[in-house]
Amino acid sequence: MKANKIKDDVFWLGVNSPSSREFHGISTPRGGSYNSYLVLDEKPTIIEGTGKPFIQEYLKSLKSKINPEKIEYIIIDHAEPDHAGAINEIKEVCSNAKIVCTEKCKDFLIAAFGVQSEFVIVKEGDELNIGKRTFKFFPDPMVHWPETMMSYLVEEKMLFSADLFGTEISHEKLFADEMKPFQEITRDYFAIVMRHYAIPVQKAIEKARTLEIEYILSSHGPIYRQNVQSIMDYYYKLATEPEENKVAIFYYSIWHSSEKMADEIAKGVEEAGSVAVKYDINQSNFVRMMAEAMTSKAIALGSLTLFAGHHPLFNAFFDFLQLNNQPGKKAGVFGTYGWVSEAVPKLKQKLMDLKYDMIGDVDMRFGPKTDKDLLRLRELGKKLAE
Ligand code: FEO
């Protein structure tokens, strides 16, 4: 991988991993990327490191641009191993560099990796002059860990945002405007990395909006250089009002009765003018389902009764769903039973515990059999779609 030029004196040093298929529980059909950046000035500076699996590729890229001994600063915006896992190997070659980070990040780097270094600790609004240019720092704790911060290169109007504004995708092109659409992957990344921290994310974006930004350089995914507003607005929407005109239906079925019920509810949703998306929870990625639930205006859950309840996979599903933290969202449940009804009452109770607004349930012994049964299911779909 060669160091790609972003603009004069600023280079991408990142690593693309097109064959990666999983990150943080996210299915990554278009791979992953771990970005780092180099600014050549009187005091050459790296922003972000890389993870251990990529260190050789990373160092090759770095050495193609500069003798690492000349690096004066390594800015670490986030201590998670995909950003800083290889910090000791980087420090070994950048032997004269100081690490620039928050106090909390210093603590994490020492605790996680045993880093031995001279540190420059920065706080909100602190500046670091590197020659013709100046960095300004904006800690944004809990976006995604407590030590995270954004670094702003004032003269270049560049915001290095760490996980914020990221997408876990291998970017064969450097810039977002050169790539085919990938918003669904951004959404899935947001669901598992950011949604649980929606309020800190919202505050960080509001802070970023006060800056004049021409480039957004996240640690994951392509660089934004045109219309940086679009990624900021999309992230803000996902943090504040992610709902679309869509109902997400999740089911577990063995003998196809719950599946048939899901199909009928979906017809009701579409008859009411909304979009229905269906997921068999035994076949689907949990983060994808969490993202679909997050961006739906209502959800429906269905299971047959087994083991005196719903299928146990729903327990994991509820753990993911809880991270969305969307009290008041409309929900319905449906299911089947043979001799005692256990799935529907338990699904209903768990959704109520998560503060969903229960608007209906349909429970059928051995599944739907009559037109009237099917109508009841379509009616539930319509109520969810309203
Ligand atoms: Fe890219 Fe929070 O790690």
Image (cartoon, rainbow, N blue to C red):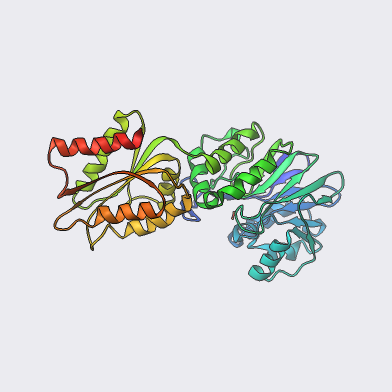
Q: Is residue 143 left or right of residue 247?
A: right
Q: Residue at x 12, y 42 (%)?
A: 369
Where residue 210 appears, as percent x and y from the top left, is 72, 38
Q: Is residue 274 left or right of residue 190?
A: left
Above or below — where is 299 with respect to 312?
above
Residue 27 or residue 270, whichever sits in front:
270
Q: Residue at x 69, y 57 (%)?
A: 59
Where residue 356 appears, as percent x and y from the top left, is 39, 48
Residue 294 or residue 286, whichever sits in front:
294
Q: State whether residue 165 appears in this view.
A: yes
Q: Residue at x 29, y 56 (%)?
A: 346
The quarter holding residue 246 reads: top left
Q: State whether residue 16 appears in this view.
A: no
Q: For ligand 1, which image quadrant applies? A: bottom right
Q: Is residue 200 left or right of residue 125?
A: left
Q: Quadrant of the C terminus?
A: top left
Residue 364 or residue 73, whichever sits in front:
364
